[in-house]
Image (cartoon, grey):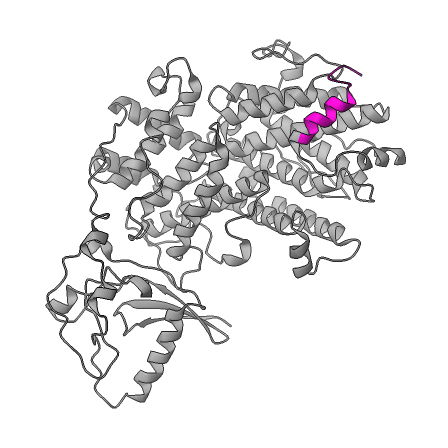
């Protein structure tokens, strides 16, 4: 039984949220009410929030002793330094508060000053040289021209923000009109990064940092933002959290996307400092700013899972560390008043755009579990009790069941590309979700591909079917914004590698599969999707290069850089085969019980001799090793 209380902390004079669960307490400070202390004390103490460096106190300081002493003249500290920091159950501050509560109870008959002074100023307040880094001047940002800025903001909102709700569109646009980006350096940085991300969706030559080089789009605005803050003393703001989200989305498509893994961790640490990973007390009324911070945190969580899974590195935060509420399913226009908090969910009857993001978060939970089990270290497996001969099969069965439940939980308007009442938004969101779904299917069953086990055969069928279904979805949406997202580009790459893995392995074993042409056609579609994005995304170009190398030497000649050898406008191989992404799902007794209507029929299970193919393949799934593996099979790059 967990009980959440709020009490006034006599140590600092600000309100604390206390979570009590089996004698455990977690404290998350929230803004205090107006103080009733004297005018002098109200200028001295603030809710700073960290015991070792309560340097921003602006209300009063207190002494947990027998006598109160005068604190001297008030310090000149801005109200911007009123800070709310999170303290968990293991915090020393929590223990000190317990002891102080006991002391207060024992001395209840004595008059204890509510704001006694106990901090010695030299140890509790920032010195002038420490405060200097805070008082930095507004950077001289170079923003785009007014018309270009408005265009880039609009492009960002309709192509990116519908998938990752980082900014509140009405407030964001209103703040730009009011010129806040010219006065607030953090909001100015958000505007620059929005323009940088939005530049990927326009052909306007003004977005190019280097003429005739489209990969430089938006760089002149991105490079102005300093992600490593000059001052480490101030609390993270909403705008800083949004900057991390936007910078990561921009960098994923850059020539050095690996740096995003570090930025994700920094952003999540800032969120945890604010307590955004923990649930608010029951009955908490959400403000718009709090909701935006929560959304930024969850966007960072999705980016954490994406980078960790692709790079094969640990996540910055895990599912068991988080009990925060999901974003409210209340679209931006429903927050007509930026201070409105009259309802928690969508006020109107129309479908919620935010619902797609919440559905994606649930998919990320499944991915996190797969990372912690199927891709964990031996030590972690022992600690989790993952022992025995068939624990992997049991984990995969549970993950497949979770995917089934996820499919069933999707709102009806997100189950079809055509969508309902969405004017294209729900079509794109549906395509994004199903692409992520197929990618996760591949990710779950991939460890079984090279191993001779009872799970290997159905896992092979599941992976190839999911890869072809992923290609179909992206083929329908290749002209939209879905294909430009890093998440879908990673999915396209994984799907292409799986299909080529199957083609090469069967070729080596001398097995001729019936749908070889269809698999190669799906590879061509995925190459086309990546090629159309490589002008603005270096990652897409790299994925194209790697897939082309894996394909090189097969029966078909490698595609050219600008033409795949087909008339992509007229050739039947590129025509859309369906208007929907997924509307009806069919039975699959091995894995998910439901499949997209884009999915092709599950191919016949291969003969038992094919198990040997996977046992002789590389033990891992390193894409760099695959290049040398295939070159070795093909005889120095020659054809079979």
What residue range appears in magenta?
625-640
Residue 271: in magenta span: no
Give left or right: position of 437 versus 176: right
Q: Up-down: is 389 above or below 20?
A: above
Residue 483 location (% of width, % of height)? 53, 27
337 sits left or right of 390 in the view: left
Numbered marks: total: 0
Residue 29 is at least partly visible in this image: yes
Q: Quadrant of residue 499?
A: top right
Q: Residue furthest bottom?
A: 109
In the picture provided, is 120 more to the left or to the right than 413? left
Residue 261: x %, y % from top left? 49, 41
Please tell me which residue is depicted at 79% across the width and 28% down the height of the picture: 505
Q: Residue at x 65, y 51 (%)?
A: 377
Q: Position of residue 190 (x, y in %)?
A: 32, 37
331 relative to 621 in the view: left or right? left
Q: Is residue 166 visible?
A: no
Q: Residue at x 54, y 25 (%)?
A: 540
Whether the magenta-drawn stretch holds residue 634 is answered as yes
* Quadrant placement of the C terminus: top right
Q: Quadrant of residue 524?
A: top right
Above-or-below relation of 125 to 235: below
In this view, 268 is above or below 540: below
Q: Residue at x 27, y 74 (%)?
A: 10
Q: Nearer the viewer, residue 309 or 570?
A: 309
**Residue 369 coordinates in the image, percent (x, y):** 61, 51
């Amino acid at each position: 039984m967990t009980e959440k209380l709020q009490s006034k902390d006599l140590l600092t004079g600000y309100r604390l949220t206390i979570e009590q669960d089996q004698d455990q307490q977690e404290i998350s400070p929230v803004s205090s009410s107006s103080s009733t202390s004297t005018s002098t004390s109200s200028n001295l103490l603030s809710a700073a929030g960290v015991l070792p460096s309560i340097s921003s106190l602006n209300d009063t300081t207190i002494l947990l002793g027998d006598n109160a002493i005068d604190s001297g003249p008030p310090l000149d500290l801005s109200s911007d330094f009123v800070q709310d920091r999170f303290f968990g159950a293991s915090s020393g501050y929590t223990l000190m508060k317990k002891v102080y509560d006991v002391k207060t109870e024992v001395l209840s008959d004595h008059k204890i000053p509510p704001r006694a002074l106990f901090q010695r100023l030299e140890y509790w307040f920032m010195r002038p040289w420490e405060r200097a880094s805070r008082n930095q001047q507004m950077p001289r940002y170079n923003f785009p021209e007014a018309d270009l800025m408005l265009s880039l903001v609009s492009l960002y909102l309709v192509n990116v923000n519908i998938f990752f709700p980082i900014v509140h569109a009405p407030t964001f646009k209103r703040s730009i009109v009011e010129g806040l980006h010219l006065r607030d350096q953090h909001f100015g940085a958000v505007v620059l990064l929005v323009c940088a991300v939005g530049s990927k969706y326009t052909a306007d030559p003004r977005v190019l940092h280097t003429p005739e080089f489209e990969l430089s789009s938006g760089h002149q605005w991105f490079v102005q933002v300093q992600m490593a803050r000059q001052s480490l003393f101030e609390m993270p703001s909403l705008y800083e959290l949004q900057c991390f989200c936007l910078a990561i989305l921009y960098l994923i498509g850059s020539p050095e996307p690996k740096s995003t893994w570090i930025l994700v961790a920094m952003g999540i640490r800032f969120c945890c400092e604010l307590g955004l990973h923990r649930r608010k007390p029951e009955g908490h009324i959400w403000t718009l700013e709090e909701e935006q911070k929560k959304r930024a945190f969850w966007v960072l969580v999705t980016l954490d899972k994406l980078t960790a899974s692709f790079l094969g590195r640990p996540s910055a935060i895990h599912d068991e560390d988080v009990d925060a509420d999901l974003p409210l399913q209340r679209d931006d226009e429903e927050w007509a008043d930026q201070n409105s908090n009259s309802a928690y969910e969508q006020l109107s009857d129309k479908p919620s755009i935010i619902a797609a993001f919440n559905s994606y978060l649930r998919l990320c939970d499944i991915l996190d579990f797969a990372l912690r089990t199927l891709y964990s270290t031996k030590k972690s497996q022992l600690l989790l009790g993952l022992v025995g001969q068939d624990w992997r099969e049991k984990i995969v069965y549970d993950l497949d069941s979770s995917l089934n439940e996820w499919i069933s939980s999707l709102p009806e308007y997100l189950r079809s590309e055509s969508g309902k009442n969405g004017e294209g938004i729900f079509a794109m969101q549906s395509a994004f979700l199903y692409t992520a779904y197929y990618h996760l299917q591949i990710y779950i069953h991939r460890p079984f591909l090279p191993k001779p086990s009872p799970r290997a055969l159905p896992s092979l069928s599941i992976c190839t079917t999911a890869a072809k279904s992923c290609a179909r979805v992206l083929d329908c949406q290749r002209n939209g914004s879905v294909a430009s997202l890093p998440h879908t580009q990673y999915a396209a790459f994984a799907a292409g590698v799986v299909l080529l893995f199957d083609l090469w392995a069967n070729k080596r074993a001398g097995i001729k599969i019936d749908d070889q042409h269809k698999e190669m056609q799906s590879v061509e579609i995925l190459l086309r999707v990546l090629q159309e994005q490589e002008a603005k995304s270096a990652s897409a170009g790299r994925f194209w290069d790697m897939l082309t190398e894996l394909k090189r030497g097969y029966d078909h000649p490698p595609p050219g850089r600008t033409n795949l050898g087909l008339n992509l406008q007229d050739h039947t191989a590129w025509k859309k085969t369906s208007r929907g992404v997924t509307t009806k799902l069919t039975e699959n007794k091995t894995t998910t019980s439901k499949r997209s209507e884009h999915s092709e029929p599950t191919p016949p299970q291969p003969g038992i001799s094919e198990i040997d193919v996977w046992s002789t393949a590389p033990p891992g799934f390193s894409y760099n090793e695959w290049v040398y593996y295939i070159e070795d099979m093909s005889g120095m790059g020659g054809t079979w």
